[in-house]
Amino acid sequence: MTTPSNSPAPTGTVPQHIAIIMDGNGRWARGKGLERLSGHERGAEAVRDCIQGCRELGVKYLTLYAFSTENWQRPKAEVMGLMGLLERFISKETSDLNAQGVRVEAIGHLTDLPESTQKALRHAIEVTAHNDRLTLVLALSYSSRVEIVDAVQEIAREVQAGKLDPAAIDPDLLSRHLSTRAYPDPDLLIRTSGEMRLSNFLLWQLSYTEFYITPTLWPDFRKGELLQAVHDFGKRQRRFGGI
Ligand code: FPP
């Protein structure tokens, strides 16, 4: 894996990296008198649409918060339903994604996932590894705090082994120990369903990211609103703490 430059997209351009907290599947389903799983299923259609939109816009990285560490606390039927949906989606879409030049990657504690979901994911990652039009990063069994703790433990082991001087620990070094080290920090974060929180998602990487919060529930989020978010982003003045 090569390490791309962490330099952000200039104002007025398309974000090179979009991260999305896909929220509101349950509320969408409840509003229609359906099971929560129907909301997740419809959410998978929004994922397909968004990948397509990102490809068309020239976005290089799309990171989707598909399952958090905290999501394991949901009822078993919903968790298993979501795992099955992810597996079906990945298996069904791999060949299309490959044909479209999409590279599939994943972050999180992937070994927590059922073996069959891991298998589908490994296959998609292998088959699409040569693509470079769009990198789709699925955050699965992901917790940003755990990711940072994992990185700190790795750094501590290097110090203990005498391979690293504590004085050499700086933000760049920590970034290089995160699971996102191969990707630039997100330029734009989209969160659907109107919630104003980060929910343990990319806490370090979102330090200077622009936010687009929409009341739209994730299953209703389509390319048109993605375009709106990108248009909105293009008007932002990013100062990164400067003036
Ligand atoms: C949050 O909505 C959504 C999730 C926890 C799961 C996201 C999963 C998908 C969109 C399914 C398809 C994903 C891929 C990558 C194919 P919520 O259930 O918390 O909604 P609520 O807050 O309204 O209850």
Image: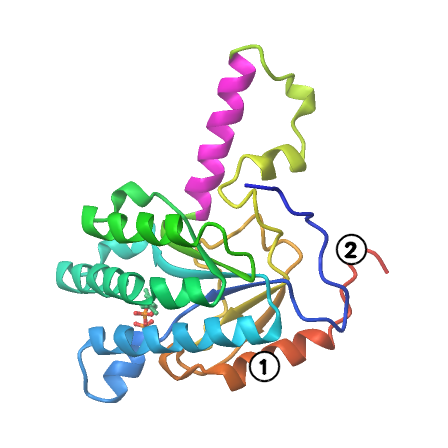
**Dot 2: element:** loop
Regarding residue 142, the answer to whether it shows in the image is: no
Regarding residue 110, the answer to whether it shows in the image is: yes
Near-viewer residue (31 or 94):
94
**Residue that protrudes farthest toward the top in the picture:** 162
Q: Label 2 is placed on what type of residue? A: Gly
Q: Label 1 is placed on what type of residue? A: Leu
Query: Magenta span covers which residues?
Result: 144-160
Residue at 59% x, 36% y: name it.
Answer: 176
Near-viewer residue (89 or 63):
89
The 10 Å Cα crowd at callout 2, few under 14, some 14 to 19, many 20 or more, is few
Task: Name the dominant secondary structure of the magenta segment.
Answer: helix
**Image x and y of residue 145, in percent:** 45, 44
Asked whether 219 falls inside the magenta stretch, the response is no
Residue at 46% x, 83% y: name it.
Answer: 222
Q: Earlier in the sequence, mark 1 or mark 2?
A: 1
Quadrant for ligand 1 reads: bottom left
**Image x and y of residue 181, in percent:** 56, 42
Q: Which residue is mark 2?
A: 241
Quarter of image, res 27? bottom left
**Image x and y of residue 147, in percent:** 45, 41
Q: CA distance from mark 1 to mark 2?
A: 27 Å
- Where does the C terminus fall, quadrant-wise? bottom right
